[in-house]
Image: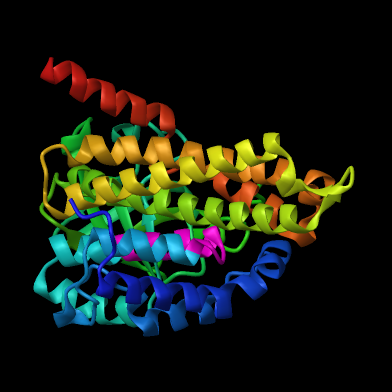
Amino acid sequence: MDFELNDEHRAIVEMAEAFASEAIAPHALDWDRDRVFPVAVIRRAAELGLGGIMVSERFGGSGLGRIESVLVYEALAKGCPAISAYLSIHNMVGTMIDRFGTDAQKQTYLPQLCSGAMLSSYCLTEPGSGSDAAALQTRAEKEGDFYVLTGQKMFISGAGATDLYVVMARTGGPGPKGISAFLIEKDAPGLSFGANEKKMGWNAQPTRTVQMDQVRVPASAMLGAEGTGFKLAMAALDGGRTSIAACSLGGAQAAFDKALAYMGERKAFGQKLTEFQALQFALAEMATELEVSRTFLWRAATALDQKSPRAGQLCAMAKKHVTDAGFDVANRALQLHGGYGYLADYGVEKIVRDLRVHQILEGTNEIMRLIIARVLIAEA
């Protein structure tokens, strides 16, 4: 394994960091305070090739791999973790269509998703099924050449402001094999959205329920074969776990950089904070956590690119470790700021609030432990 970025990787990182510094970071606190979803900025990111990072070039994507994706999401998260996380979800939908869609679905949606003309959301979680996703209750009843969907999805990022929804619904009996995936456009009759949830963080992207009341879609809206929806959803989440880990890493790195700069300026007891050995130790521990997290994240992303049989377990490990470490580093960065870290103007408390949810979504970190343990026991 090569732990150094090549010239192409460095160019991608420089491009994404420059965009985050110019178009995202200066506005992140205002977006958070005012709960603004900056669609125009997201579309600008898409113009740079970040709307379909892993989508094939034939359909307007960048045709890159998972390792390039995590580099992009880390870089963007330095500007705002919530914006980077939304882009990762949008990309996840595009990648699902590129991998599992029909030619007609690809031609209809991928060029618009890659360009940012259409934005997308991923709809799996329901009010009564979070970690137990295979217990979802949304139904899709077949009526001739159509399916009629009824049910509710919850905690859906971008909902109400996005244009395309990939919805997992039950077409068969109980369990994962009874679930299929559907592509539903925003203006479909019977599709509606709840109020924008009031959240601890991630205020720069809306989170709403998605309600389906007899939503009628053609059979051609099914993504993949009937009964494979849960498999598609889980495959997408393997990649999503590396993406959200990268967002944690970028946010934590930004918080660390703020703390280091602050400590170089702030004085107490006649000397700079960076001159206190105990605080030097804290910086060393935080920097080590960031570097370990980055290295392991690259390992998991590479396993996905290489289709390693261990990829699922490694993605679960990376998601658990990096999101836990990222939150801890950001929280310690807040502590190193003292009272100033608690003030909104310094931007650190926002990062802490944004990163907290990363330990919950894309599979809670408790579920990540379960995935890891099951593989270990099966191989024993």
Please report the residue visible at 37 percent of the width from the left and 83 percent of the height from the top: 48
Residue 109 against residue 189 in the figure, above or below: below
Q: Quadrant of residue 292?
A: top left
Q: Which residues are magenta?
A: 77-93
Q: Residue at x 52, y 73 (%)?
A: 20
Q: Residue at x 77, y 57 (%)?
A: 344
Where residue 68 appears, as percent x and y from the top left, is 28, 65
Q: Is residue 59 above or below residue 163?
A: below
Residue 44 percent across, percent down from the top left: 46, 83
The image shows residue 26 at horizontal and vertical percentages of: 65, 75
Magenta region includes residue 92: yes
Task: Using the image as rendered, state which of residue 225 and residue 294 is in the foreground.
Answer: 294
Q: Nearer the viewer, residue 317 or 105?
A: 317
Q: Residue furthest right?
A: 269
Magenta span: chief secondary structure? helix
Residue 227 at x, y = what percent? Answer: 14, 44
In the rendered structure, the answer to whether residue 352 lies left or right of residue 215 reads right
- Residue 145 can be seen in this image: no
Indicate left or right for 229 with 10 as reference: left
Which image quadrant: the C terminus? top left
Residue in view at x 16 percent, y 55 percent: 305
